[in-house]
Amino acid sequence: MYNEDADFKPISLKDLFSIKNTKPKWLVENLLPDNGIAVLSGEAGVYKTWMLIHLALAVAAGEPVFGTFPTKQGGVLMIDEENRINLLQERFRLLGYKEDLPIHLLVNKGFSLSESGVLCKQVFEFVQTNKIKLITMDSLVRIHNKDEKQAIVTGK
């Protein structure tokens, strides 16, 4: 949506090329930006949670994702409002977890992006204290109360 209050200041091609170009920084090389946001989307039952667990294990261990994409090692916070504890235990076990990896889980605690305040502050403080590099949220539809179809139609 066009912002009428924004300054209308196009730049020339010469100006474009005068801007120092820096290489992007990656948490997972060529897949997940460092200090960025990415969305993994798909139909139910297409292994999105498996993918998140694999990503968490790889980032926490500093190992390549799928044995191919290098990672920047760091802590992981997995916020899961969809899966049961025993299902997550089983999947971590099958993917070869190590107990000492810096992976932290907040499971079925009623986390909501729609509620600001204390909970968001607690998450921010936890991320800072525990040097979290990756936050996963499973699933997006369960942690907000916005009408996703409305956002597509109105751009809000």
Image (cartoon, rainbow, N blue to C red):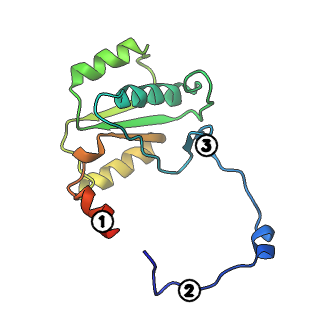
Element at label 3: strand
Work out whether residue 57 or residue 41 is closer to the camera in this orientation and state it.
Answer: 41
Q: Residues within 10 Å of mark 3 (few under 14, many from 20)?
A: some
Q: Is residue 14 left or right of residue 29?
A: right
Position of residue 114 measured from the top left corner of the image (x, y, whole percent)? 24, 57
Q: CA distance from mark 2 to mark 1?
A: 26 Å
Residue identified by numbered label 2: 7
Mark number, residue 135: none
Instruction: Mark yes or no: residue 117 visible.
Output: no
> Quick one: label 2 or label 1, which is nearer the N terminus?
2
> Quick one: label 3 or label 1, which is nearer the N terminus?
3
Residue identified by numbered label 3: 26
Q: Does 26 appear above or below 52?
A: below
Residue identified by numbered label 1: 153
User: Which three-letter amino acid code belongs to the residue tagged 3?
Assistant: Trp
The image quadrant of residue 99 is top left
Residue at 47% across, 25% down: 57
Instruction: Mark yes or no: residue 44 visible.
Output: yes
Q: Does 5 appear above or below 65?
A: below
Element at label 1: helix
Q: CA distance from mark 2 to mark 3?
A: 31 Å
